[in-house]
Amino acid sequence: MPDCTELNVWGELVAHQKVMRAVSMRTLFSGDTERFQQFSLMVGGIFLDYSKHLVNVETMNLLMTLARESGVTEATRAMFNGEKINTTENRAVLHTALRASQCAGRDVLVDGKAVLPQISEVLSHMRTFTQHVRDGHWLGYTGRRITDVVNIGIGGSDLGPAMVTQALRPYWQTGLTAHFVSNVDPSHIVETLAKVQAETTLFIVASKSFGTPETLLNAQVARQWLLEQAQDEKAVARHFVAVSTHTEKVKAFGIDAANMFGFWDWVGGRYSVWSAVGLSVALMVGMDRFEQLLAGACEMDAHFLTAPLDQNMPVIMALLGIWYNDFWGAQCHAVFPYDQYLARFPAYLQQLDMESNGKGVSRNGKAVRCTTGPVVWGEPGTNGQHAFYQLLHQGTRLIPVDFLAAAESRRPLGHQHETLLANCFAQSKALMLGKTAEEVEIELRASGLSGEVLQALLPHKVFPGNRPSSTLLYRKLDPYTLGALICLYEHKVFVQGVIWQINSFDQWGVELGKQLAVSIEQDLLESGHTLAHDASTNGLIELFHALRDGGE
Ligand code: G6Q
């Protein structure tokens, strides 16, 4: 497969971008009454409006050619079929299989072993366990019901369950509260333990490797805290469960293998919320709703696998991202949920997208020639409007935006939801239309300004417009819709990785810092010996000792 930049269509897209630079979205809309219908589609309860983009039919055709010639369809089949597409780790990538049972997806073999029976076994273990906790059969060491669930994990073993649990807050069982501890900063675990009682708290230690120092340190603190109060080792079995692929390490930590929920090396950390890593979600909202989450994802999987490229929602979103990233020089991609329950969604997407596609070497080991994954960021609307939207509207950067909103509020209150959505729609409209100098002048004259005062103010009030955004609108944020939404972004990231020819499923870039931290920690623990780092690191270590020990 030639490098994506060597494909003919890549050159055609470069040339086409020069034409599109002179086109305004205002003109595109006024010249085509069908634009909204043409550039929108609905899948799994999610409506995507991509009409407010710097694209026309020719743009989309060229982008579809790029997808076709990059082998997106073949790569998608390879992933769903369990081929070992994560080549640097020699692993299959089968988070799609985790939800396949919810929509009669077919089984696949990994190393000659069918995966669906293994998945359904864990799902049924999760069902029994979560039912017992939720209905009060599973009790703490003093015989009281569990009131608090603390998930201890980091990265993929935290962001997914934390985001989904928060998104599904309206479905939480009364009397149960979820907490998430991830940071090795002791403040995190200490502040969390201060909120709960040992006799009614269940800890989930979630770690695929069961070797992540942050997680194990926090889990040890929680275990010690429990034992100080229970004064009985047997209490651990009532208050600790593990989610992991490593039975031996779980047992060595002191958690009974019967209280372990397994998953497999073909589930990447950032794709693991669909596995037993979602146990906290299932505890909070119940197993039926957890399976609805899987079912929503399964509908999106089936769509992604079967829909033609030009009617394929993840493919369309991926190509729009590539259009701005590689042909317009956009550095980042913003995601603004006008949905408070999705407050952690941008943070979740940061890992999904940036850990997957933040790569500079292609699958064949050579440096990529294109620009790969963007910086992903975002905050819930309307908060962002009062903070950084200024830069979006009048700054010098091109920042494509995804707006997300529900038609129905989970907490209706007067007309506040309409106020929220009016702001959402107004922002995408403002980004697209902008405000011309002529329009500003009319406004300023109407407000009584004229002459030099008007002329001095006028340029500051002009909005260039022509700034692209997608709007994703759904009826309400229920488990099914959320499942489809997460899955949509997973496949968007996958398609981009295929086109850029990178491995979206490894994460070697997180290793170096971890390695260096080991020797630096030794130097922080023991002062007085010769430091062998660079001058800056040595200086920081010395200053740390001086500050901590009360010196300068
Ligand atoms: C995700 C990454 C990473 C991982 C964490 C936690 O894709 O692999 O974020 O999830 O490092 O790892 P463990 O689950 O093994 O503790």
Image: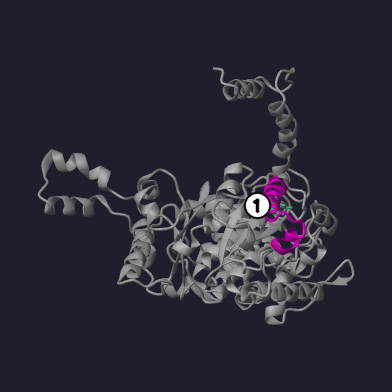
| Quarter-of-image position of residue 431 | bottom left
- Determine the residue positioned at 67% across, 65% down: 140
- From the viewer's perspective, is 404 left or right of 281? left
Query: Eyeballing the image, is 434 above or below 280?
Result: above
Can residue 66 be seen in this snapshot? no
Label 1 packing within 10 angstroms: few (<14), some (14-19), many (20+): some
Can residue 115 be seen in this snapshot? yes
Cβ of mark 1 under 8 Å from ligand 1: the answer is yes
Q: Nearer the viewer, residue 56 or 280?
A: 280
x then y, percent, for residue 157: 67, 56
x then y, percent, for residue 489: 59, 63
Q: Is residue 227 magenta?
A: yes
- Determine the residue positioned at 56% across, 21% down: 550
Q: Is residue 49 magenta?
A: no
Query: Eyeballing the image, is 240 above or below 105?
Result: above
- Image quarter where the C terminus lies is top right
| Quarter-of-image position of residue 165 | bottom right
Q: Which residue is mark 1?
A: 155
x then y, percent, for residue 511: 73, 42
- From the viewer's perspective, is 90 left or right of 147? right
Q: Which residues are magenta?
A: 214-242
- Determine the residue positioned at 44% across, 52% down: 21
- From the viewer's perspective, is 244 left or right of 137? right
Characterize the magenta stretch by its predominant secondary structure: helix
Circle 1 SS class:
helix
